[in-house]
Image (spheres, helix red, strand yellow):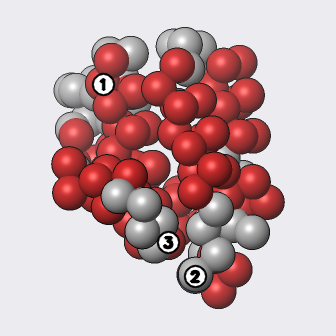
Amino acid sequence: MLAVLASGASGCGWSVSSAREAYAQKWCSYYSQCDDVGSGKLFASADECLTRQRSIALDLWPSADCDSKIDAKGVDVCFKAIEITQCNIIDQAATILKCTKGNVCK
């Protein structure tokens, strides 16, 4: 995870694949902090969370639309929003709106 996050922060910009991976990692960290990962919870395991969040990120930022078009400022806004999202559906929805293709792929 640190390598993925470092690649985005290095000044070289984000590739679509590194941005999607970081997106998945950040959401799974959020879900873990909200106690939504574990047996009988929203995600049975961290691996399940990552698999599902990677799939969401792939749909959200498709290569055809986002390859070589990731906007560092848009990614930063999205990731900072995830980091401060409260553990409720209303806050989640507001955060998701900051992470749309239109905000991240320019």
Instruction: Name the image quarter holding residue 64.
Output: bottom right
Which label was assigned to residue 32?
A: 1
Which label was assigned to residue 67?
A: 2
Compare residues 104 and 35 and report the one nearer the observer.
Answer: 104
Which residue occupies the extreme bottom position in the image? 64
**Amino acid beneath label 1:** Ser
Query: Does the image show residue 55?
Result: no
Which residue is at a point 55% across and 13% down the rendered structure image? Answer: 86
Mark 1, residues whose alpha carbon is within 10 Å: few (<14), some, or many (≥20)? some
Percent across and percent down for residue 5 are 31, 51
Residue 39 in the image: above or below residue 49: above
Which label was assigned to residue 16?
A: 3
Compare residues 57 and 4 and report the one nearer the observer.
Answer: 4
Which label was assigned to residue 40?
A: none
What is the secondary structure assignment of the residue under circle 1?
helix
Percent across and percent down for residue 105 are 69, 66
Q: What whole-number distance in Å separates the C-alpha atoms at marks 1 and 3?
A: 24 Å
Mark 2, residues whose alpha carbon is within 10 Å: few (<14), some, or many (≥20)? some
Q: Are marks 3 and 2 in contact (CB under 8 Å)?
A: yes
Compare residues 47 and 86 and report the one nearer the observer.
Answer: 86
**Amino acid beneath label 3:** Val
Residue 33 in the image: above or below residue 92: above
Percent across and percent down for residue 71 are 64, 62
Q: What whole-number distance in Å separates the C-alpha atoms at marks 3 and 2?
A: 6 Å
**Amino acid beneath label 2:** Asp
Percent across and percent down for residue 87 are 51, 13
Is tag 1's residue or tag 3's residue first in the polypeptide sequence? 3
